[in-house]
Image: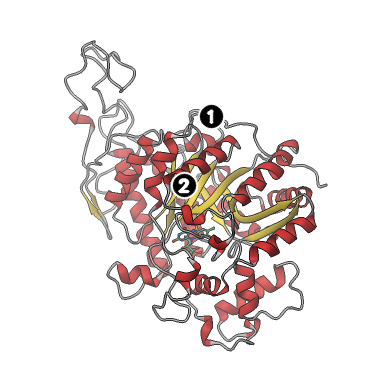
Amino acid sequence: MSEPTKKQLIINAFAMHSPSHLNPGLFRYPTDQGSSYKNIQTWITLAKKLEAAKFHAIFFADVLGGYDVYKGPSNLSPTIPAAAQFPINDPLYSIPAMAAATESIGFGVTASTTYDAPYALARRFSTVDHLSNGRVGWNIVTSYLDSAARNFGLDTQVEHDERYRIADEYLDVTYKLWEGSWRDDAVVWNQGVNGTEVNGSDAGGSKKERSTQYADPTRVRQIDHKGKYFQVPGPHLCEPSPQRTPFLLQAGTSTAGKAFAAKHAEAVFLHAQKPELVRPSVDSIRQQAAALGRNPADIKVIAGALVIVAETDEAAHAKVEELKKYGDREGALALFGGWTGYDLSTYADDQDFRFVELPAVRSMVNHWASTVPGTEGVKWDKRTIADYLVLGGNGVKIIGSVKTVADELERWVSVGDVDGFNLSYASLPDTFDDIIELLLPELRRRGLFWEDYAVKGGTLRENMYGQRGQSRLPEAHTGAKYFWKAGQDVPPYSLNESE
Ligand SMILES: Cc1cc2nc3c(=O)[nH]c(=O)nc-3n(C[C@H](O)[C@H](O)[C@H](O)COP(=O)(O)O)c2cc1C
């Protein structure tokens, strides 16, 4: 066994409000509960189970259109039978219900800066931050599906780097609303006439005299944002929530994506096959963050992974083969079409995509060919691609006994410098049950995973950073310049700075 590293892992569950997330067709597996995604009890039961096991959070991926490129254009017929991320409900509405049934686990929710107005999004996240006692995170995405663009009134997607420029200004608007529109001590109803608190709780019941004002109007102000992409006068509609800005996550490894992450993200999701290959991106994001004055350790790097663990290596591989029988290969190729924009149906069945003329597809497939275990000498045709993507999508698959899996996770930490994992499922909740019963005790034995939440009943940011009292953005974060602290007559930023 390699020398144990004492970095405490962040362990999240990666899910979707759809019958299948990264497992097209697996709703057919006899014990799979993916098709119960519409039932709030499914999510409440899962949240309680994951909290009992001390998962940091559940992260919900989300998309705003169908995967209609394969056998397209605009064709959902391979997608629909597989339930390949379709149908899909909005994840945000389930968070307060899960929060009411738990006290410490966090919830990440994906929302797009391309198709949602910042004023409305800021309000929705503040609402859920209040109702969850500060346990919500925002997975900031710029989106990738043309089908979403068309349904939001565009002919095609906004150009890739332009999406990130829009996202950058979008974040400024939301920081101003969350951090700079209401002074920290704006709400005064429970302060009493002489400034002393008359009622520590907002549940009511105190007979003592309360302030005549709910909030002090001199401590709530317009943000008057006038930028290139957004005009938002404000003020923010919600009073300050526990975290103000929700814990910020981001996924995207293009040059523009990494620059965005270095400036804004508190956690970054990455997909890669090997920790050696993830390391340059991790180093680049941490270096860029340091150049912006941030503590590089304040960016938590979280690798997406499918972990299938069993008593022995053979049993784990047998489990994978059994699960794969239920996978839908057409659905997997539909996912590939949406992720890349390329329709593999236009190629012959025996086309080896390691040699295809499309550079983007060729390089992706060659990457898989050189990294996916057990595929040496295999022809990467549609069958192989579908078989590879049908469980766990494009993320690494770590399959084996407890020792095999724990050793490999340790290697990801020491070689890749990652801080943790977003664990997807092949079958819901069986994949998590195995991880809880078999893997987590071993990670604890190796000193790699906490016994309990750092801050029981704390905010998501407190538990992600492992620090009590760290509910707000760190002071060195770009959003902290918008803080409007108690006692400051005006917030420390100029109203006109983004003009
Ligand atoms: C692990 C991971 C999870 C992602 N989850 C979502 C998601 O739920 N919704 C979405 O629209 N995009 C998602 N993305 C896509 C990214 O947000 C981004 O659009 C994509 O990686 C392209 O950005 P890039 O060109 O900067 O890499 C995810 C990407 C990764 C790597």
Q: Which amino acid does label 2 sit on?
A: Gly
Name the residue nearer the viewer: 98 or 318: 318
| Amino acid type for the residue under numbered disc 1 | Val
Instruction: Choose the circle earlier in sequence order: 1 or 2.
Output: 2
Question: In the rendered image of this protein, does residue 421 appear above or below residue 485?
Answer: below
Q: Is mark 2 within 8 Å of ligand 1?
A: no
Left or right, 371 with respect to 259, comes to: right
Q: What is the crowding at mark 2: few (fewer than 14 residues within 10 Å), some, or many (at least 20)? A: many
Task: Examine the rendering and report whether any part of residue 472 can be seen.
Answer: no
The answer to which image quadrant residue 188 occupies is: top left
Residue at position x 49%, y 40% in the image: 106
Q: Where is residue 170 in the image (x, y as percent from the top left)?
A: 34, 54
Q: Residue 486 versus residue 188: which sits nearer the camera?
A: 188
Mark 2 element type? strand
Say whether residue 262 is left or right of residue 169. right
The percent coordinates of residue 406 (x first, y second) are 74, 48
Q: Which residue carries the number 2 mark?
A: 108
Relative horizontal placement of residue 19, taking residue 381 as reference (left or right): left
SS assignment at label 1: loop
Give the image quarter of residue 357: bottom right
Q: Residue furthest left?
A: 212
Q: Write the residue at 64% across / 87% down.
A: 350
